Structure formats: structure tokens, C-alpha cells
Amino acid sequence: MADSRLLALAAAAALTLNAGAQAPAATQAPRPASEAPATFRAGVELVRLDVQVTDRDGRPIGDLRQDEVEILEEGHPRPIVFFQHVEEPAESYADIARHTIAGEVSTNKGAARGHLYAIIFDQLHIMPGDEQRARLAVERFVSTRLKPGDRVALYAVPGPGPQIGLTADTHRISTALAQVQGTAEAQTIGAVATMTEQEAFEIVRGNELILQRVAGRVQAEIASDTARRAGLTVMTGTLPLTDLVKEDARKIANAADGESRAVLARLADILRSLGAMEGRKTVVLISEGFHGDRLTRELEDVAAAAAQSYSVVTAFDVNRHEIDVTAAELLEADHASIIHDRLAPLGSLAAETGGSLVIDAGHHADQALAAVAGQSQDYYLVGFAPRDVRAKDAYRRVTIRVRRAGAQVSTRTGFTLTDAAARIGRYQSIERALAAPYPQQGLPLRYTTYLLRGQAPGAHTVILSLEAELPIAASKAAQMADVVFVVRQAGDGRVAASGRDTLPLPSRHDAGATSGTGTFRVQFDLPAGDYLMRAVVREPGGLLGSADRRFTVRALDGPSLEATDLLLSPVRGELPVRPKAYTGDGLSGVLELYARTAAQLQEARVLVELVPVGDTSALVSGTAELSDVRTTARGVTREARLDLPLQAIPPGAYLARARVMLGPDTVSQSVREVDIRPGRRPAPDGATDRENIDREPNFDPRAIAESTIAHDFIARLENASSPALADAKLGVDRLRSADFAGSISALESVLQAETRNGSAAFLLGWAYHGAGEDRQAISAWRRAVFVDPTLVSAHLALADIYERLSQPALAAQALRAGLTALPQSPELLDRLARLGQK
């Protein structure tokens, strides 16, 4: 069952492109469900809502199913096309990092992340001095309650005051809090009357009692001796005094509305800016409130901005609820009514975003902030296609119901579609994701790395293998997803490798799944050392995921015996993110040993064990089969092939451990997790049995040896009386008889003497291909087309091998490279056309 050429094929499956990006392949992802949900397709306008679901005791429900959720847009049911659980890990940051960043497979599911807080002081609606208690409480909260992964922003609106975006610099936040000042005024002077803002709004609403109260107060002021001595009079003309008071009230109310609109516009801008960082945000809005009679549109705009950035608004009421005994004509009932009136818009905004209104927060701000910090960050992202994607400005009501007894739902109650011109561009969103303090979870993804020895001294090849959950392609012409990765040195943060490429969207998915899985592979070379990597995937609609990885590149060309990473797969060219094996097939794998001398490798043994995850005792073990020692320009190498039976192994998660031994000592060890499943491996599309999976390349070596290229190759060397003629004839003869090892040895000797002989490189490629060493075959054919770009057969050979390795983009690239030299080649044009039809 072990494939003796798995290592070479695995390396050949990931080829370097410039900065490291490579064309991918798309597969499907199983995702069982109780019913077939709507499919998440690329190009569809998608609205995502963050939904928190708890039980009767307030504990998060973590096993909610998609078929238990119902969405109503303006009362109309909408199918769910995106469903994701964003779980708040219960482990410590270090424990999370061990299995998401430093683990064998890096993922953004359950990734370490902190809370995101935005503290916003509505200075314009806070009386001077009333902000002090909340300000001091915020300072204590920032200094003592924030965890290392948390971020906090501080804004004083509309200004002046602090305008600090999300940051981990708590000292900066604490220092800036001293600049926050309440600026509201108790009374407003009109042309005729002096009145409070509350009185002005009551008069505008038609409250005759308040109108008469203010008018009477004005009349009393006019009649007062103080006013006459000061020469104060009121010229009412033919208008009654009450009409003049009404006019003043309208002016005061309009001015107050204008100020409130400025605050709400600034608040909406702040909330939209928070959307640059993925994740749910807790917004603490500190205010004494304002009148919202004529601000419905502006409040909906703030709610829409909160929906776009996944912000939950918790409003802190900092009014003085005790009665001011010096205030004239103010009853306790009036005071409570005034506060209630001004808090109504804050309560509405909190309800629209799934938050809450904290009454009299000024007197218990510490407890209120502690309660905010204690809120769970466990929630679900639920996506649906809106009914009408053309109406971009209308605020639409949405209701989410959960069909589970006792479930409590907390979510926003509406949304507004964003105009395409106002959205963050693809490159800008990717750059923000690369700079974000922790991974983004909009798209689930996971990836791993494989270490092999590179081609040049001191260079070690790292192969990145990645899977991302993506929407289904709406058509063959669907856009591609973007893939970007950056590798930095762990010590100083300098960029060591990076790449940007595209990834085809899956064309279909399993029954019960709303999306499919796209796969991506790329290789790049690094010197030995410790590295940090971030990979980002963005689908055409704008959803984005990223994950971090820490890995070490071991020196594989030193004086001691070293080994590559363990590759586990029975399929040629497959580099799985997480290997799977089946009890009916057994576990196949390979690793390669390197040393300076043959004697080191001759004494080596490789012991293989299969250990259940979390246990220490192996359930099955064996010794790997070692191939013959092979000499290369950088030393000697030897391949170890493992094949373990699994019939008696219960399905589950295991560690496959390969230990390289010299005598009693373990000199190198490679470990990889593997999922053991019952039965036999399912046949891929177009394959009906296991033989179809592992069959050898279908080519006739005699046809290659007797081709025109081979005849011309020998003839040119004869005409030139080349000393390499004997090796050339031997190489072709050995190829004809399918003695691939002998052909390789002879043709390599030819190329040492004839370094620019494209025909020799072309024939060598077929010899390597016959031996199953497709990595070397690709290198030989690349050398052939570099030396002789007009060698059509070499371009075609490259295209064929890339397509066999499920790399159609690389196949097309090889054909286009040939057309650069031979623009009218019918063979290349026909092959490219046929490739485009698949």
C-alpha cells in the first residue's frame, strides 16, 4: 500500500511562483445536516447577523443547528445560506495558542482573541461634572480589567476630545480620559424666553401646560422691577406672547436636533470604522440622552452602522436622578419624566443592536463595566440573501427565531445594505487582515506546513497546504477567492517569504452543506530558523478569514542524520492539511533521510508507532522499509516507506510517530496527527477502484525512445563526435527497455557534459517520470524548455503532469510559456483550448 514515490510526488504537487503563490485545486467538504439548506453561492448579496443564543440561565448554547434558526425580513422568511459558530474558548491564551498557532494544524476556529471595546462619551449631552464618575470608572476598568488580548477605543463626540481607535495601549487611553468634559447647558436663551431644552420640546409637541408656564415666567420677568430698572422690554407687536414663546421653542428644538444629528453622524462613522476589525464589538455609549422625536432616520443609520461592524451598544445613563432642590418649579414627577424622555433614544438604539440600557450607571459604573466585560463572546454568524438588493438606503426590519425550548435570542433588529462603492476594497481588506492583532473568523480556514530539503545549500523547502470554507461558484465564470500569506522571522519580524494568488471557488458541495472547501498549496524556500506566518483568504463577496502559525525550519543539510516531515497519504501528489486513513486500507506514508555519508544511512532504522491522541501507549507499531542509498550533489539520501495495518484499530484521532534510530538512540522524530475512519477510502470522481487511484502514468517508454527527438538527439552527438555519445545511446536504450534508473544515470552523465542539451533534459524527464519521481521530471522538463523554448513536446509534457497533479492553472501557464516562443503552434493552441473546456 505504501507508494515508493509519494515524497517526490508530494513535492511536485506544490511549485514555487515568484513570491510563493501557486495555483490551487478545489474540492468539496462534507457537512452533515438534518435537512438540505440553501447554498451559499458566490456573487450573492449576503447579510450577516451576529446572534447570541443562551439558555434560561444565561449560558451560551454551543450546539445550535442551522435548521433550528428562522430569519424573517420584514415578516417574510428568508433561507439561511451561511451559518457559523464563533465560540469563545474556555482555555487560557497559552492553551489556545498551542493548538491553533503552534499546533500541527493552524486554524482560526476557536483562535485566541480578546474583547473589543469602544468607549464613547457623548459630551454634548452630559452636564459639566456629570461625566466624572463614569470617567474614573472607565480609567479603573482600562487599568485593571483589560486582558492582554483585549483592545479598547476611546472617543469624545462630537469633539474636541480623545479620538483613539482600537488599541492595546491602556496608558494612552487612561491619559486621554482627562480630556473628556461634559458640555451640555442647563438652559437656553431665546429671543424672548429663557427655557430648558426639555421645555422647548414639550412646547413643540403642543404641551399647553408647559407653554403657559414658560409664558407666565416671561411675563413675570417683564413686569419685574429689576427688568424695568435695567430698561428691559419686550416688543410683542400684534403677536401674543405665547406665539413668540412657541417660535423660540422651535428654534431651540431645531438647534438641539442639529447638535444631536452631529453626534449621531459621528457615532455612525465610528461604528463603521470598527468594521475594519473582524469580531463582535462592545460599544459603551455614555450620555444623559437627547430628544429623538425627529431623529428616526439618524438613529436607524447608527443601528445600520452597528450591524455592519457587529457592534452591540450598551448605553450608560449618567443623569443625576436625585432632585436638585435649588431648581425652580421642578417636581419629582417632572424630573423622572424628563430623564425617561431623553433616555428613550438610547434605549431604542441599545435594543436595535442587541445591547442594553443601564439606568443610573453613574452611581454603579464599576459594576456596570464589570458586567459588560463578563458578557460572553460566544455567538453565531447567520447569513441570508435579502429580498431586494437594489434598495441600498432603506433600513429593513429583521427577526430571528430559534426553535429550541428555553432559548433566549439576543441580536440586532434591522440592517441596511451597503452600496458597493462604499465597501472596503479587496486589497484594502486583505491588508487590514494582515495587520489585525489576531485572526479574522469570517471564513473558516485551516492549514499546515511540510518541511523538505531544498535544491540549494542552506535552503529548505516549506510546503503550505491550506483549506478554506468558501461559497459555491455561481457559474464557470465565477470570480476567484484571494489567498495571501506572509512569513516573518520570529526574532525580528522581518518578512522572509510572502505570496498572493487566487483560488477557484468550489463548483459543488455535499448534501446538507451550504458551502464547499477550496484547497491551496504553495512552496517556498527558507533558511533554518523560527517563523511566524499569517494566511488570509477572501471570497469575492468580501467575507474573509485568517489564521496564524508558528513553525520551525530545521537544518536538513548539516553533518548529522536528519529527516523530512512525515507525509501520510496513499494518493499520489496529495498533501492533506489533516491526513485521513481508513481501517480497510491501512496507513501509508513516507519520509526522506539525509546525511553526509552513506555509512550514516546504512545503519539507520525508522520505527513507526500509532498512538491515540492523549495517550502514551502505541496500539500498533512497525519498521519502515528503507530504499537504497542515493547520492546527490549535497550528500546522500534514503527514503523510508511505512505501511501499518489498521483492521484492529478503532476509529478516532491518532498520532503517527516515526523515529529515526541509530543503534539505541533516536536521532530524529517526526509526528503528525491522523484521523482513522472505518471502511475503505472513497474513490474520487472518475475512479471506481483503488487501482485507479494509484495507477502508474500511462505512457510507452519505447515510443519516447524511438521518437524523432530521440533520433535527432543521438544524430547531433554523432555528428559532433561528442564524448557523451556513449552515455546518450545507453540512456535511450535503457529508457526503451523501461530500465528507468539506468536511463536516469546515463542521461544525467550526458547533461554534465552537454549542459545546454534540451533533448537530453526532455528524455531525462521521461525517465524520471517512469521511475515515479515526478518532482525531478518537472525539473528536467523545465530545464528542457529553458534551454530550448521551441521544444513543443516538453511544454506538452509539463502541461500533462501538472494536470495529473490537479494543477490546471500551472498546466495553462506551461502552455502559454510555449506559445510565447511559438505563438502559432497548433499543438499548444489545441491543448490550451481543451484545458479551458474542463
Image: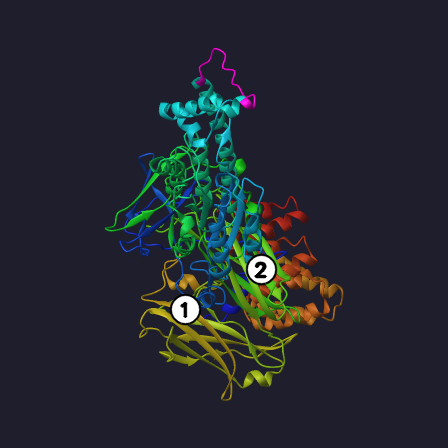
The residue singled out by tag 2 in the image is: 15
Give whichever of discs 1 and 2 has the lower sequence position. Answer: 2
Amino acid type assigned to the residue bearing label 2 in the image: Leu
- Of the pair 521 and 184, the residue shown nearer to us: 184
Mark 2 surroundings within 10 Å by alpha-carbon count, few (fewer than 14), some (14 through 19), many (20 or more): many
The residue singled out by tag 1 in the image is: 674
- Where does the image place residue 744, in percent across and percent down from the top left? 61, 70
Q: Residue at x 68, y 62 (%)?
A: 713
Mark 1 surroundings within 10 Å by alpha-carbon count, few (fewer than 14), some (14 through 19), many (20 or more): many
Q: Is residue 339 above or below residue 704?
A: above
What segment carries the magenta color? 229-241
Q: Could one spot residue 811 in this view of the protein?
A: no
- Where does the image place residue 663, in percent across and percent down from the top left? 51, 89
- Of the pair 607 and 643, the residue shown nearer to us: 607
- Where does the image place residue 550, in percent across and percent down from the top left? 53, 66
**Secondary structure of the residue carrying numbered label 2:** loop
Q: Residue at x 70, y 58 (%)?
A: 787
Q: Is residue 214 above or below residue 507?
A: above
Please name which of the two marks, 1 or 2, marks the residue nearer to the observer.
1
Q: Quadrant of residue 530?
A: bottom right
As drawn, the residue found furthest toward the bottom would be 664
